[in-house]
Image (cartoon, rainbow, N blue to C red):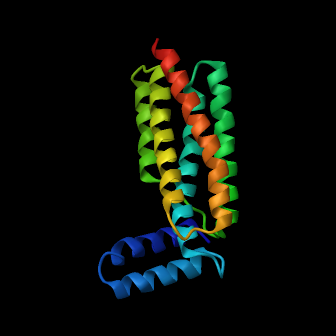
Amino acid sequence: MTCSTVRLIRNLQRRFCGARTHSRYIVKSFFHRVLVEPGSNLADQEDSIQIVGILNDGHKGFMDFAQHIKDPQVKAFFVKESQARAEFAYQLRNAAGLRGDEESTSGGTIRRLWGDVKVKLGGGDHTLLETAEQGEDATKEAYQKALAEEGISAVVRETLLKQQVHVQRSHDQVKALRDRRAA
């Protein structure tokens, strides 16, 4: 599945899902047939696609910020987290039976651009850590929201629970690093 096909389907969803119930059913049905494995749970797909997008944001964001961070220990942590997010996206794609190539979210793209602007304006490690923590907050919220959903399969729930523990630890570490830089 190409990225352009995924974009087309998402645009169809945005355009028709709010219009009429019948249109919503048609687009969801088409979306389900094209992007997911046969026999997969639709609730798994919708939540997983959102989280995979956020994980892709984390992968790109941590890698981008690692290039600008001056502290070698923080840089190593960011590279490691970038790799972990890519692995988490792969695991979740497999658990949910996703076939598509999910893209990043617009919020993640904006956070990365904002981080780049801060660097260009002379912001140091502290400002990048602040931006990284905002991204971690969004990731934490997405996991909590997905796990609150009823109807997700046991396999996807188990995958999300395992990953959520790591995401929470990562968030706490980014926050601690930020607080240390502020002092």
Where on the picture, by quarter, is residue 79? top right
Residue 65 coordinates in the image, percent (x, y): 55, 32
Q: Is residue 173 left or right of residue 10?
A: right
Please give the name of the residue rendered at 45% of the width and 33% of the height, measured from the top-left corner: 131
Q: Position of residue 154 (x, y in %)?
A: 66, 66
Q: Residue at x 41, y 76 (%)?
A: 12
Q: Is residue 7 left or right of residue 156?
A: left
* In the image, residue 67 above or below residue 61: above
State the residue lying farthest toward the top. 183
Q: Quadrant of residue 71?
A: top right
- For the N terminus, the quadrant is bottom right
On screen, residue 15 versus residue 58, left or right, reads left
Tally of numbered tags: 0
Q: As displayed, is residue 138 above or below residue 3? A: above
Q: Is residue 20 above or below residue 167?
A: below
Q: Residue at x 47, y 56 (%)?
A: 145
Instruction: Tell me residue 132's x, y (percent).
Output: 50, 34
Residue 38 position in % (x across, y down)? 65, 81
The residue depicted at 60 percent of the width and 63 percent of the height is 101
